[in-house]
Amino acid sequence: MNISQMLAANAASYPEEVALVEIVPGKNFRKEISWLEFDNRVNRFANALLQRGIDRGDRVLLMMRNSIDWLVTYFGIIRSGAWAVPLNFRFTSSDIKYCADIAEARLMILEREFLERVEAIRDGLATIEE
């Protein structure tokens, strides 16, 4: 059983139980999602990747802060059959380019706050299609 199958099994066994809790200290923010909701969101994200033409074995860079959305994105990449390549949110533009080149990544998923770093190297990202 792989990690994606484990998630699906938990969704089937404990659909209404809390799977993930996200808390932002100092901002009075707390978010919870159930195993079923987590699994459904992962399925939607994986299907969106497949509809965009991501194939089994494609590498997808992921640059986001730790959150429930990060987990949905990570598991969605895996469920699509692609390889998730998580990047540290502290990486500089040159770090990002190095990782993109080594991974021969086809797609990059990032939060808006990291866009400036990626735009600085966009023309040099030969394998990134979107």
Image: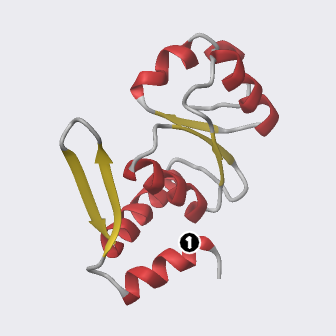
Residue at (40% x, 70% y) in the render: 39
Q: Residues within 10 Å of mark 1 (few under 14, many from 20)?
A: some
Residue at image mark 1:
4
Residue 84 place in picture, x, y as percent: 64, 50
- Quadrant of the drawing holding the N terminus: bottom right
Residue 32 place in picture, x, y as percent: 26, 61
Which of the 4 quarters of the picture holds residue 120? top right
In this view, 108 is above or below 3 = above
Image color mode: secondary structure
In this view, 9 is above or below 37 = below
Residue 56 place in picture, x, y as percent: 69, 59
Residue at (23% x, 51% y) in the render: 30
In this view, 88 is above or below 56 = above
Q: Amino acid at mark 1?
A: Ser
Residue 20 place in picture, x, y as percent: 36, 63
Q: Residue furthest bottom?
A: 13
Secondary structure category for the residue under label 1: helix
Residue at (77% x, 37% y) in the render: 104
